[in-house]
Amino acid sequence: MAPQSSPLRNPHVAVFAFPYGTHAAPLLNLTIKLARAAPHVSFSFFTTDKSKHSLFSSSSSNHNNIPPNILPYVVSDGIPDAHHFPSPHPLERVNLFLRAGPRNLKEALRQAVSRANERVTCVISDAFVTSALVVAQELGVPWVALWTSYSFSLSAHLNTDLIRQKYSCANDDDDDGGNGSLGFVVPGFSKMRIQDLPDGIIQEEGGEETVFSRMLDSLGRVLPQAKAVIVNFYEELEPPSLIHHLRSKIPSLIYSGFLNLSLPILPSPPSSHTHDKTGSLSFLTKHAPNSVAYISLGTVVAPPPHELAAMAEALEQSKVPFLWSLREDLRAFLPKGFIERTSNNGKGKIVNWAPQTLVLGHGCVGVFVTHGGCNSVSEGVSCGVPMICRPYFGDQFMASRMLEAVWEVGVKIEVFTKEALMKNLNVILVQKEGKVMREKARALKNIVLDAAGPKGKVEKEYFKSLVQLVS
């Protein structure tokens, strides 16, 4: 795709989503904010057909919120016809999508340029869609990357080579690096450990190389080439040493705040309980303040059957009231009669889905049992709720460590066992340690609310500079 020479009319921004996990929604939310702030700019939003349906259908939460200067387009998922997936894990789908590369993006982009009759003036993409840099370079326009996770994981990927070198030396020499500390990266990393790193940073001997792993390897080289990198986080939550280090790698670093949230999260009015078809909010009002465990472990990876059974046993024996968002197909792994017993005695409620921000903002919720996904952690922090994290992959380990060791508003569980969950529910809901944790969680919530307000850096500085960039 050669640099464009057609006359410039209005600015036209091409936005490329990473259509897996919860990556696409924050990027769409960012695009909506930009489109409202810059109504003269056209935005073409590219994602796969399945992702487009989820984000733009009449049943989506954003359906009535999308301004007219955003148009969605379909980009191929790269999956061959009649392809069989041996596993439900999304990694193979991710590899096929990434393998399709710049050619796939450029083909979809031609349709948008033809329809809009406006040449592209800027490219924004999820940081994982590194092919967007190639497209932007060929068009001769700036590329802006969105990092949908937190700054700790971004710094880890920017320092992959250093971490690998030091970790290898630590193993060889058995020096202080062997204890797992990542303090040698930047001072702000002193609480992080080797075992908290996202997948792929430490190479396992004999590990299979994939398109996805090669993309992760390239981030430290690719992201510094962006015109700007947007981080789905608040600068006010960062250790100053980490901010300084990130800016040494990426001078144009822009903090967007939590893109999955509209803050402050207001308490749900009684009228909303009537419209809550799940009955979650009505269930919560029957219990004492700070007494209910809300459980939601994400939609990408499910806990193994033995962990689901252990969780149920812990909840029933501890007699802690609980609201559990759990898919129908996973309920077969719960102990026989568990659902009926806990429902009949009023202690438990299991739903297919819950209005998570309203649930976490309810005063009766005392602890959030989560997988440590970034959106969930953002919601828990913004509502001032202590968390129990059981991470499964990716940046969930660093997010869980951040909650436990940096902010001290949660605990991490390696594997759900009956004893471990009972112990940590007791710590947070009953013990003095939990009271201290709750106070710190509320203080952290206040920092977030101030950062999200009109005097925070996002509104005063960062968002304005981003609007100027795309305009």
Image (spheres, rainbow, N blue to C red):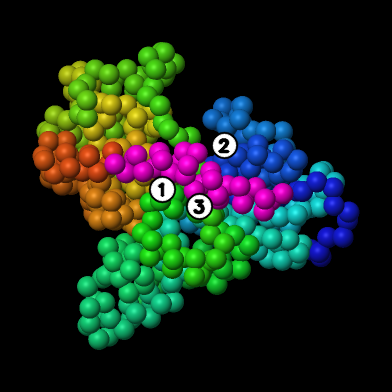
Disc sitting over residue 374 in the figure = 1
Element at label 2: helix
Kindly give the residue lying farthest to the bottom in the view shown.
173
Magenta includes 242? Answer: no
Element at label 3: strand
Q: Quadrant of the N terminus?
A: bottom right
Q: Nearer the viewer, residue 335 or 222?
A: 222
Q: How many marks?
A: 3
Q: Quick one: label 3 or label 2, which is nearer the N terminus?
A: 2
Q: Quick one: label 2 or label 1, which is nearer the N terminus?
A: 2
User: Residue at 32% across / 26% down in the picture?
Assistant: 362
Q: Which residue is mark 3?
A: 255
Most common secondary structure along the magenta stretch: helix
Magenta segment range? 443-471
User: Residue at 67% across / 53% down in the picture?
Assistant: 469
| Amino acid type at image mark 2 | Ser
